[in-house]
Image (tube, rainbow, N blue to C red):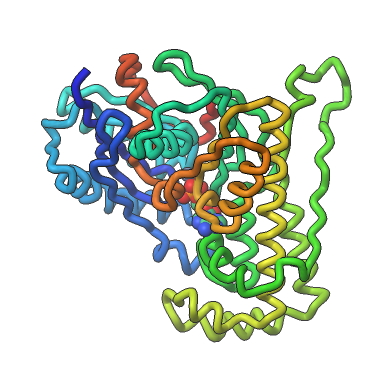
């Protein structure tokens, strides 16, 4: 088959994105319009505002992606759009637009699971870098603001299947970064700023014990054979532990001082946030990140051993974290396991990953029917 150009559209959370990807192996253009400044004053994504911003951005973002790729509405071969999981209203904007566009252009439309998109971000870049042979079985950690999931991925011809072998029982890892940053008045989103601040503190200053999660259902009849190999995550406890530390170490006044210093600046730079932090806060931030990284790396590699996998993929917004990358690379190389990440740009939400995940489905002619609708709680299998 000749070159296939797929226009991908992504609007599941707070990024409006469009991209053109050639044959699942080359990012020809990728445009991401981030709504960060809209949500920043609230310290988190406000769903109603997200939908409104997607509505405003979707047409110019798609146009720019086509222009940057020297493509037109007519020259592309197919469209791909995120159908879930995500915010219902936000998903609907991208989905309705993609459906209308595909219908009017008489081109095939492919519905893509956002989590499968994150996994294909890694595969896309590996192919782009000339690495075509991936050893199976593959274990993928998808770690973002909404998800902390471990999947065993298998491939038969063009068809991929995913088996959930562990996920968070409560908060996602990115959510913990965001909530801790909000609590400490460090800004939004929390991941990138904590990533920047952590090297300025002592990661051994504060100990955060992680609870071992026991199986909820102790009745043997209700258990699945895979349960023994399940690895579960939980991140609501560490958020409470940070809160407790703040209260027992009199950090409240310093948080308030920081709020007053940074409040008047509409988008404080990382350097300004750092300047507003005292050593104790930096130690707390460094220790929090260290605990998160150790938990994610430890549990992922333990799942990799249990399932005897040949390759590990780490993807999603939190995969952009520097300490997480270094720790994964070190530990995986010690274990003799090949590990792959997307570039930082493709770790966070983008549409190139959606267009890439759609390519095998394009080859298999798995096109969406006209009833395709958004599914906020869509699962990956
Ligand atoms: O994948 P993504 O863009 O959106 C979702 O699908 O959720 O992930 C966003 C999440 C946010 O929680 C953000 O704080 C986190 O990824 N994040 C990071 C870093 N960059 C983004 N967390 C830790 N370190 C980073 N460098
Ligand atoms: Zn995402």
Q: Is residue 102 above or below residue 31?
A: above
Q: Position of residue 76 (x, y in %)?
A: 17, 31
Q: Give the side of residue 60 with respect to residue 34, left or right.
A: left
**Residue at the (71%, 44%) spot, across then down:** 298
Nearest the viewer among 198 and 374 is: 198
Note whether residue 81 is visible. no
Q: Quadrant of the C terminus?
A: top right
Location of residue 127 by image quarter:
top left
Judged from this view, the residue extending furthest toward the right is 219
Nearest the viewer among 127 and 376 is: 127
Exactly how many numbered labels are in the figure? 0
Q: Give the side of residue 63 with respect to residue 15, left or right.
A: left
Location of residue 240 by image quarter:
bottom right
Q: Quadrant of the N terminus?
A: top left
Q: Position of residue 364 (x, y in %)?
A: 34, 14
Note whether residue 194 is visible. yes
Nearest the viewer among 152 and 175 is: 152
Q: Position of residue 158 (x, y in %)?
A: 40, 17
Q: Give the side of residue 106 with respect to residue 136, left or right.
A: left
**Residue at the (32%, 51%) spot, across then down:** 32
Q: Give the side of residue 100 with respect to residue 17, left or right.
A: left
Q: Position of residue 294 (x, y in %)?
A: 70, 51
Q: Is residue 159 above or below residue 96?
A: above
**Residue at the (80%, 20%) spot, across then down:** 223
**Residue at the (43%, 17%) spot, across then down:** 159
């Amino acid at each position: 088959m000749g070159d296939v150009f797929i226009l991908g559209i992504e609007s599941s959370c707070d990024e409006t994105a469009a991209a053109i990807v050639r044959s699942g192996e080359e990012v020809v253009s990728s445009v991401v319009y981030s709504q960060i400044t809209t949500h920043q004053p609230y310290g988190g994504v406000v769903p109603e505002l997200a939908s409104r911003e997607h509505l405003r951005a979707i047409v110019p973002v798609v146009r720019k992606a086509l222009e940057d790729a020297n493509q037109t509405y007519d020259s592309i071969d197919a469209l791909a759009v995120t159908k879930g999981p995500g915010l219902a209203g936000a998903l609907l904007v991208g989905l309705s637009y993609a459906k209308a566009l595909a219908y009017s252009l008489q081109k095939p439309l492919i519905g893509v699971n956002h989590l499968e998109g994150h996994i294909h971000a890694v595969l896309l870049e590996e192919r782009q870098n000339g690495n075509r042979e991936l050893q199976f079985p593959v274990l993928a950690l998808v770690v973002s603001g909404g998800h902390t999931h471990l999947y065993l991925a298998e491939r038969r011809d063009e068809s991929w299947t995913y088996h959930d072998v562990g996920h968070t029982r409560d908060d996602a890892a990115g959510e913990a970064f965001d909530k801790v940053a909000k609590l400490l008045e460090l800004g939004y989103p929390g991941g990138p700023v904590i990533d920047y601040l952590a090297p300025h503190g002592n990661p051994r200053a504060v100990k955060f014990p992680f609870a071992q999660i026991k199986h909820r259902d102790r009745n043997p009849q209700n258990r699945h054979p895979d349960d023994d190999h399940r690895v579960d995550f939980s991140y609501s406890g560490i958020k409470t532990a940070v809160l407790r530390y703040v209260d027992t170490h009199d950090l409240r006044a310093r948080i308030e001082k920081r709020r007053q210093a940074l409040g008047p600046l509409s988008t404080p730079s990382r350097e300004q946030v750092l300047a507003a932090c005292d050593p104790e806060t930096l130690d707390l931030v460094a220790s929090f990140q260290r605990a998160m990284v150790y938990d994610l790396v430890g549990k992922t590699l333990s799942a990799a051993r249990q399932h005897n996998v040949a390759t590990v993929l780490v993807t999603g917004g939190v995969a952009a974290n520097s300490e997480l990358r270094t720790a994964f690379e070190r530990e995986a190389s010690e274990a003799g396991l090949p590990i792959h990440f997307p570039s930082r740009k493709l770790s966070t939400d983008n549409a190139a990953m959606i267009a890439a995940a759609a390519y095998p489905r394009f080859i298999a002619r798995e096109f969406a029917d006209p009833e395709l609708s958004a599914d906020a709680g869509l699962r990956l299998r």
